[in-house]
Amino acid sequence: MTVNGSAEPVIAVEGVEKVFDVRRKAAGTLRRERHQVRAVDGISFTVPPGEMVGYIGPNGAGKSTTIKMLTGILTPSGGRVRVAGIDPSRDRTRLARRIGVVFGQRTTLWWDLPLRDSYQLVRRMYRIEDARYARNLDACVDLLDLGPLLDVPVRQLSLGQRMRGDIAAALLHDPDVLYLDEPTIGLDVISKAKVRDFLRTVNAERGTTVLLTTHDLTDIETLCSRVMVIDHGRLMYDGGLDGLHAVGESERTLVVDFAAELPPVQVPGARWVRSEGPRQWLAFPAGDSAAPLVTALAASHPLVDLSVREPAIEDVIARMYGAA
Ligand SMILES: Nc1ncnc2c1ncn2[C@@H]1O[C@H](COP(=O)(O)OP(=O)(O)OP(=O)(O)O)[C@@H](O)[C@H]1O
C-alpha cells in the first residue's frame, strides 16, 4: 500500500457536513414544507494506515451518511474528505480500487450466481491480475471456510455464509481501506467469531485500515483500538474504548447460577442487581476484569454456571450523555 510507512493519514475528514433538503407535510395541512436535515454537522478526524476504528452512534446519528461520503456515493455539502489521497466524490472510480465496502444488510454479490462466479465478475471489474486473484481468493477461502460454498448460488447461502462471501469479495482487489457497515448483524455466535478472527488477521497481515460501524460492542472490543461516537451528526467522542466506558460509567453484568438459592451475594468490586431462584445478576465496571469476581465467588459458593453480559452500545452512549 502506497501510503503505508508514512505518517500520512489514509482517511482525512475536515469539517465535513451533509445537509439533506427534504419535504415534509406540515402538521394539520396538506402543504409540504421544505426542511433541512443536517445529517453530518461538521466532523473532523484522521485515520492512520492500518488502524481499526469503530464508528458508532444511535440510529439516525449520521454513520451511513459519513461512510457514503467516504466512498464517494454522496458529495459533502461542506468540508473536505480525502481517502488514500483521493477526493471520493470527484474520483469515485479511482477510489473504488483502493477501498472495499461491506454492508451487513445487503449483499454486493450476484444473487443467482455461485460465489465462484461472483468472484470472477469482481475480478474482471477490478482487472485483478491472475496471481494476485489466486492468492487472495485462496487466503479468503481458507480463513473464511468458503471451500464448500464456492459452487452454491448466493441465494441459497445462510446469512453468516453470505456475509463471509461478501467480505471475501470486498478484499479480492487488496483494498487499502475496508468499510464495514454492521458486518455481524443477525449472525450466530460462531459466525460472528469467524468474521472477527478473519478481520483481525487481514488487518495484521495486510495492514488494511478498517472503519467499522456496528451496534455490537463486542465487535468493537475485539477489533478496535479506537472508537468514534457520532450523534446528531456530531462527533461526541474519539478515543480508546476504556475512555468511552469511563465517560459512560458503563457496567458489565455477571450472571451466576449457584448450586442453591442464596441471599444476595456481596463481592468486592460488584453490585448485586437481582436474583431469580439460584441465579443472581452482579454488575461491575465495564473496564474491570471479571476474573477476580469469579475467583471470589467460586471460593465462597458452589457454582453451576456463569456468563458475562456486555453493556449494549446504546446504554453506553445513553450513560455517556447522562454523565456529560
Ligand atoms: N437521502 C436522504 N434524504 C434525507 N434525509 C436523509 C437521507 N439519508 C439520511 N437522511 C437523514 O440523515 C440522518 C442520518 O442518517 P444516517 O442514515 O446517516 O444515520 P445512521 O447513523 O447510519 O443510522 P442507522 O444506525 O439507523 O443506520 C437521519 O436523520 C436520516 O433520516
Image (cartoon, rainbow, N blue to C red):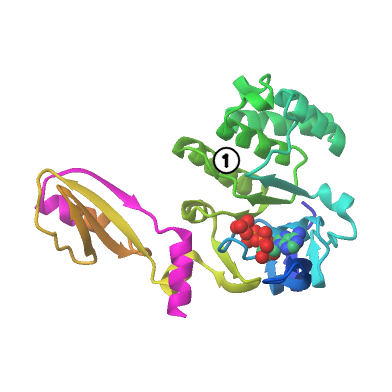
- The residue most toward the bottom is 324
Identify the residue shown where x is 57% and y is 29%.
158
Answer whether residue 274 is magenta in the image.
Answer: no
Seen at 24% across and 66% down, the residue is: 269
Q: Nearer the viewer, residue 207 or 21?
A: 21
| Residue 244: % across, % down | 47, 69
- Residue 193, image x, y percentages: 49, 40
Q: Quadrant of residue 116?
A: top right
Q: Is residue 127 visible?
A: no
Image quadrant in which you'd find residue 64: bottom right
Q: Residues within 10 Å of mark 1 (few under 14, many from 20)?
A: some
Expressed as whole percent of the image width and height from the top left, the position of residue 236 reads 57, 74
* Total numbered badges shown on the rendered structure: 1
- 263 vs 143, left or right, is left
Q: Is residue 305 magenta?
A: yes
Q: Is residue 69 visible?
A: yes
Q: Give amino acid for label 1.
A: Phe
Q: Which residues are magenta?
A: 296-324
Residue at the spot 61% in from the left edge and 37% down from the top edge: 163
Ligand number 1: quarter of image: bottom right
* Element carrying mark 1: helix
